[in-house]
Amino acid sequence: MESLIALLVGAPLVGAAVLLCGGKRLDRTGHWLGTLLAVVSFVIGLVLFADMLGRGAEDRALHQHLFSWIPVGGFQADVAFQLDQLSMTFVLLITGVGSLIHIYSIGYMEHDERRRRFFGYLNLFLAAMLLLVLADNYLLLYVGWEGVGLASYLLIGFWQHKPSAATAAKKAFLVNRVGDMGLSIAIMLMFTTFGTFAFGPVLGAVGDTSEGKLTAIGLMLLLAACGKSAQVPLQSWLGDAMEGPTPVSALIHAATMVTAGVYLITRSGAIFNGAPDAQTAVVAVGAVTLLFGAIVGCAKDDIKKALAGSTMSQIGYMILAAGLGPIGYAFAIMHLVTHGFFKAGLFLGAGSVMHGMNDEVDMRRYGGLRKYMPITFVTFGLGYLAIIGFPGLSGFFSKDKIIEAAFASGGTQGWILGGAALLGAGITAFYMTRVMLMTFFGEERWRKAPTPSPAEPSVEPAAETRGEYTPPHPHESPKSMTLPMILLAFGSVFAGGLFSINEAFVHWLEPVTSFEHGHSPLSAAAVTSATIVVLLFGVALAWLQYGRKPVPAVAPRGSFLTRAARRDLLQDDFNHVVLVRGGEQLTRALEQIDHSVVDGAVNGTAVSVGGLSGRLRRLQTGYVRSYALQMLGGAAVLVFATLLMRGV
Amino acid sequence: MNPINYLYLAALLFTIGAAGVLIRRNAIVLFMCVELMLNACNLAFVAFSRLHGNLDGQIIAFFTMVVAAAEVVVGLAIIVTIFRTRHTASVDDASLMKL
Amino acid sequence: MSSAVLAAASATSTGEAVQFWILGTVAVVGALATVLMKRAVHSALSLAATMIILAVFYLANGAYFLGIVQVVVYTGAIMMLFLFVVMLVGVTAADSLKETLKGQRWLAAGAGLGFGILLIAGLGNASVKHFNGLGEANAGGNVQGLAALIFTKYVFAFELTGALLITAAVGAMVLTHKERTERAKTQREQAAQRVREGTQVVPLPAPGVYARHNAVDVPGLLPDGTPSELTVNPTLRKRGQIRDVSGESLAELAALERRSSEWLERGEGTERGEQVRERGEEATR
């Protein structure tokens, strides 16, 4: 069975290699090959899952040592895999959702010339993510981590002919580099502290290590997680990443990329358990991000960007839960899995809407679409109910547990975190209802020609308005697109409930992440009812705003907060002022120093050496007797030195 | 008499030879001075051999002689070649290897 | 033999001391002469003398084999090779001892003096009071002792010197060998070239064509009685080894003329005799 683990990674990797190197002769069949290999990987995952269920809870972990990668003295880096319950969960999520997205992409990318390449990148994305979650040491995890970064860069910038897509890809890559830096520093710290970076020895030796070192490692790991999972302060890339094709967004948000940070923190749980300060930082980041993302999501008119804000917010929930320690790990992963289902469903639904609306993304140009695309409406609606935590659906079970755990973290911190999580749930209900209402209900705003928006003057070029406006013909998407949406909708509805029967999911993960019941100051029933009340309040508010009143085709100017939220809460402006300007100043200063001090030293050395050489050159007279004289002089000096050393 | 006097003599001869190398311009005489230096070293080796009571010094002197013979053969051949092309045996005239 | 072994043993005899001081002085004088003599031949001979004295010192120090080798190889072979090359290159040009490199002489004197003083100071500090002597080492015979060392301990060095000698011999042959790249000129072509260039067309006049001085170092006389430069070898001329007999012969010619004019009592003859005599006196001066 162990030998199958490498195949999990190998299948999509082979697919990527074949598709990217195969050339044009694969243009017709490439997408089938890519999809097939993703499904193969999923089937292998299922086989391994069945095998794992057949064993006792404590000996479910499998190890496979492939080869020694860098054996240098005390530095032993192996290519070895570890498949335990946590990895298994991720494998099933990644390959399952990934396969569905592959299938969906067959239809979605049908008219794209470079579809084969797209599937190659998708396979590469899956392979890198699988390597990340299957590695048994941090260095191999880092390889997968960077592979994910690379694949995301390639996919976000897939439509590279659009400058905005190319810029967004660069932005994602650069912001991710900051986080990668954190991970590489964390790995270096681990090596100096523990002398190894394999999971087993590192996490086993945590008890004997000082808290300071653990805090340093933990903070570096948090920085890495912030970069990959788009948490404050490294969240700015996620919104721009919507420039990629919609299946990519679904893949990034649901299955692969942003979940890596949660995985990293959960996997390194032992380190965070030993470093309370680092844990505090983690929950702070999570709480801030979940509100931040939710507020951004409220203001966006671009359907994908609104969903991106929601992803940020939901990942914030997971990070928050992961930062709570053993009372939260299992719920973080559970929310991750349910979120994988409904967020993938929502994105695929959004893609389906765009597919029917000539790639229009502005929700103010939608409205009343439920009649035209019923399947999309139903699946999207189920995803919507799941994400807002409607009782009985997936999101309800996982999010409710996180809110409960947040209250249970104790003291003032518990109240603050719990309050933030509760507030986040309300805002989630508000903005998701807003998306739902603006897209599927109300007036059919797309029948009218668009008017240039004063709030965002340069969004639409004038060319379309000048000519005859032909409204789009909304239609349902082909089966290859609706089938994955239907399957994901099933997951959105039932996954949470299934996981919660007898706390099945918690017990499944317990051997890896350990679990404690939190002692909440509020009873579970009180938290649940509070959540439902907040939820209903958010929905009602959204309905009052967007359901009862007609949605203006042009975005109103809005309050300061709205305008700030439209601009991602001024994140880019902040980055520009603090990092770009500051960086420019720093660079200029450094350049000055480089010119005067470093170049000065180098040039000074060169000039002095040159001058000295010019003088010394005169010693080369060409007269052999001069040379003999110099030799004798040198010999005399040597004899003198020898005699001196011997103490004459 | 102390046999160290042989060493003083060797040092003196060596120094005279070295000075000759520096002063004379005729390549042949210059070579002779080099031979004088080698001979002075040989005398020192032989004297050392006697001081230490073993034959290793003499062996070294022997090897020096062989090497000196080889050196003289090649060196004189070079001098003859230079003389053939430049019609002079002065080392100062062969001073083209400079900037 | 026994006395020689004793001489090489632990103490030096008075005889050896006397020998050292006398021969050592001669050796230093020879070395100085090597450096200071103007002519390369003289330098070579002085060096040969120094080397022979060193051979004697080798013998006195118990290095019998080396002493003989010194005479045979150094003085016999190497120095003769030197003389041979001196002859080949030409002994004509006596080195001018005038220094051309600026400050070279003073610096050389300074460096040499400093080096010598340092060496002698080092030796003076060495304090060799006891010495072992070669009595034991030479017990089985000096040559046998050397052979035992050369063919055991130093066998690789010995083989290498063999290779070195072969290389040197080949190298010397390569260096001195002159590849002829064009056909040698025939006598006819050389003559044609001489006519074309307008240089000496006929053979050079022979030297010493005078009854009493038929030798290569005597220049032939022109019709007016002056010596001709062309008739003697330029090497002899450069060395100043030409015997000029023109004054003598002119004087004799003048006397002959006078006698004949006295016998014939002819005024013109007397006049002519006077002219010849005057010219002869000039040449003698």
Image (cartoon, coloured by chain):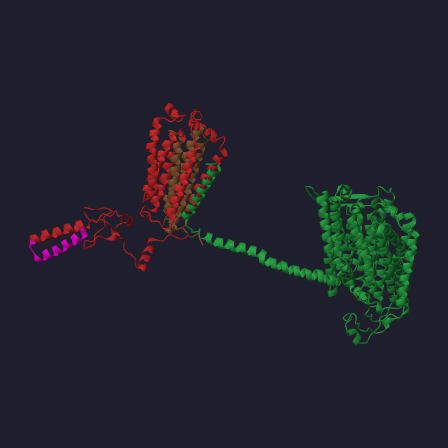
Which picture quadrant has residue A125? bottom right
The chain that appears red in the image is C
Which colour is chain B painted? Answer: brown
**Considering depth in this image, is A405 or A439 the residue closer to the camera?**
A405
Residue B8 visible at all: yes
Relative placement, left or right, of A271 versus B61 is right
Quarter of the image with the N terminus of chain A is top right
Q: Position of residue A528 (x, y in %)?
A: 91, 54
In the foreground, A381 or A513: A513
In the image, A561 versus A174, the foreground residue is A561
Q: Main secondary structure of the magenta part?
A: helix
Using the rendered view, name the quadrant where residue C137 is placed.
Answer: top left
In the image, residue C283 lies in the stretch drawn in magenta:
yes
Residue that sits furthest to the front in the current view:
A412
Q: State whether residue A125 is above or below residue B60.
A: below
Q: Colour of chain A?
A: green
Q: Position of residue A263 (x, y in %)?
A: 80, 50
Q: Which residues are magenta?
A: C264-285
Res. A9 visible in picture? no
Drawn side of residue A371 relative to residue A199, left or right: right
Q: Is residue A364 above or below residue C252?
A: below
Residue C172, image quadrant: top left
Q: Position of residue A499 (x, y in %)?
A: 89, 50
Which residue is found at the position 46% from the left and 53% from the top?
Answer: A615
